[in-house]
Each structure stands twice: as structure tokens, then as C-alpha cells.
Image (cartoon, rainbow, N blue to C red):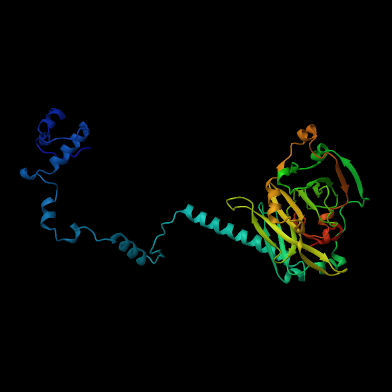
Amino acid sequence: MSMSEFEDPLSGKNGPEETLSHFSIHDLALPEDFSEEDIAFAHELEVLLIPEQELTPPYYVQTLCDSENQRFQAVEPGFEKKVSMRVFRRLNLSRRLYRSHKSPLQGMMKTRSLSRSLLIAACLLLMILTIVVTGPAFASGMAVLLSAGKHSGVVMVKTHPSVIASDANHLSQPSGPSIAVQHEHMSLLEVQRQMNFPIYWPMSNTLPSSYALNKVYLYQDPNQNWADGPILELDYQYSSPGVTPLEPGRGKISICEFKPVGKVYQVVMLGAAHQIKINANGQAYAIYVDGQWSQINQSTYKWQYGERSELIYEHDGVIFWIVGDQRDGIDGTALLSIASSLLPLDVAHAVHTGGYFNDVTSSYDETPALFAGDVIYTDSEDGPSLIVGGNLRNTIKVN
């Protein structure tokens, strides 16, 4: 940098060394990190203003003497905004008085968050509307409870949706060929090869005393489209020597497990189900159902409390329906204990050791008998459907 037009006669003729020798700032303590360029620049600033030698910048005296002149005073706060507004006003241009300090990224995130909230609200509204249009039974009042995993749960209504089932024109026809009921026996290894998820088995110490595995069923109806592959059912029977057998239908615990296609809900009486925490932190829930639908006559159903108990539980994309009888002491706590102990079974090891049931009855064109009275609501790629009475032949498509 050079300010030669303001240099004084002290500027050295023999180079910067001579100049620096006359530099009065050498009498002062200079910062240690000053380079020769810094010192030279400081020198140029010093020679620009040497009052004792009356060497001053141009108009220095005029500026001091005319300090009251507006041109030489500091501008007031907001001067730039005022000038800008004056220019915009004279040019008749639109302007924003206040500039937003939000970054474009904040605006994008806010828009994306709003869009996501609207999408979730729209999905929930669509699900509720599809259930409502299934008939007067749903329109009279309902509620939805979801279990962990969000593919299972219950739809609670005030009355049984049998009104819909009476409309035969809406009953869907089976998608596959009609075949006679067939049964065959398979090993656990053969069953595991046909399933799209590992077989889950409860720990024996979590089952109530005197209950032992009685039968294992594999249901693989080609006409059903709400389960991804076969449905497995483990049946446990109460058996104790010297004890009077229980009434028919009692003394049973059944575990039904399947992988859903879309969402699979059970339709139950309003108020007959509630959520149960399945872990200590309370972030996941199972659904406990008290009772089941009971048929009075050909067209009338009522909800029967105090008999069947059921737990709807979902884990790793697999839905479990676990059923017992309250009159046998199998309540929500007992069912939750069984659900918490379900673990994938090492089938090869189980067959090798021989400690597990290895005779599975495979059934075609049939549904689990224990759930034959249930009403199931499904929602998959084919659209919403209502299975009345647990019979796949009574499947109603919801338009």
C-alpha cells in the first residue's frame, strides 16, 4: 500500500531501512507479531497525520472547524432504511417494511411437517370413514384400539354387524376353486418351510398348571387373502389326574399366530376391550378383550361377557390371538404372561431332541374353530373387507 501523495520529507531516499530509522513509533513498544509490512503500514498512517509539523490530511482543518455541518456528522440510526423507503416511494415500487429472518431451510421443514401432519390426519379419517360405511352397526358408534405394531387391534361397535351379513348380494365369492375339506399330518420341519415367519412357542413355565399341549393345527385356506401364508394354532388342554373334567369348551388355551396382509382387526362390543402394557416403559400395548359374540337366533347376536378372554398381541410383524376362559382363571394377566414368553422355536433342534409336539394337522378350506364366531375387519391392497362369523365364505367387500 502506498500513500506517496501524502508522504513527508522524512521518507527515506535509501530504502525502507532509512525510513524506519526516522520512524518515531520505534520509541514505543511494538507488538511481537508485527511484520515489516505492518510497521511500514503504521508508518504511512503516522506520516499521514503529524499535527506538530502541521502535516494533516486534506480538508482536516476544514472538517474540524465545520463539525456542525450535517455532512460531517455521523448518520442517525435507521438512516439506511429511511433512504431505502424514500427511494422505493419515489419509484412507486412495492416493498416489505420488515424482513423475515427465517432461513429457507426452516420454511421447508415447517412445510414438510405440516404436509406430514395433514397426511396422517387424512389416513386416520379415511380408515374411520371406511369402517363407518360398512353399515348401520358401525354408524351407531365405534372406537378403534391399536396394539403394538399398528397392524392389529380391535374395532369396537355398539351392535353386531349382522345386518350387513344378511345382504347376500354383497357377499364375495371365493377367489379360488372350491375344494373339499382335507386333512393331512405334517412334521414341524415341513410346517416351518411353508410359513413366512418363524414358529413362536411359549415357555412352559408361563402356562397355568395342568395345561399341556394337545394339538397343533396349520390352516392354509387358498381363499383367504388377509394372512400372508398359513395360520398356525397351538391348542393346550387342561388335564389333571383325579380332577373332574371341565365343561365342554372349557379348559382350553389356544394361540393363533399369522402374518397379516395389511391390517387385521377384530370387531368387538364397545367397551369390551382395553389396552394392556406389554413392557415396563409402557411404550407398547396389547389388547385385552372380555367376552365374545353369542348367537341367539339366526339373525340376532349379543355380546357375552365373563367367559372367553382374549389377548391380541403383535411382535415383529406377526399377530397373536391368545384365547382362554375366564371361568378357568385365565384372565388378562395370565394371557399377557404367555404372550411375553413367546420366542422363535429352533425347529431343527426341537425335532432332534424330541421334546416338542411334532405331529401337526394341516387343514385346507377351513378356519380355526375357536375363532369361528368372531367378526374380522381387514384392510389390504384389495380394499376393506368384513368377515362375519369367522367364515371366509361370508366376506363382505366394503366399497
Q: Can residue 264 be seen in this view?
A: no
Specify the quadrant of the image occupied by residue 115: bottom right
Q: How many labels does the image show?
A: 0
Q: Quadrant of the N terminus?
A: top left
Determine the residue located farthest toward the left in the rendered image.
52
Near-viewer residue (64 or 177):
177
How far across and down, in percent of the image, does residue 311 sit?
72, 55
Q: Say which residue appears at 74% left-offset and 36% top-offset.
A: 346
**Residue 112 on image: x %, y %:** 55, 55
Residue 218 or 136: which is nearer the viewer?
218
Query: What residue lies at 76% left-to-right and 33% top-to-bottom?
Result: 349
Q: Outermost residue, right direction?
A: 180
| Near-viewer residue (131 or 188) | 188
Q: Position of residue 243 (x, y in %)?
A: 82, 51
| 36 is higher (above) or lower (below) than 277 | above
Identify the residue at horizontal 72%, vertical 60% (top origin): 289
Specify whether residue 86 is in view.
yes
Tell me where residue 368 appears, x and y as whole percent: 83, 52
Who is closer to the viewer here, 352 or 135? Answer: 352
Q: In the picture shown, does residue 99 fall above or below 2?
A: below
Q: Is residue 210 left or right of residue 169?
A: left
Quarter holding the C terminus is: bottom right
Relative to 278, 347 lies left or right:
right
- Left or right, 229 with respect to 113, comes to right
Which quarter of the picture shows residue 166? Answer: bottom right
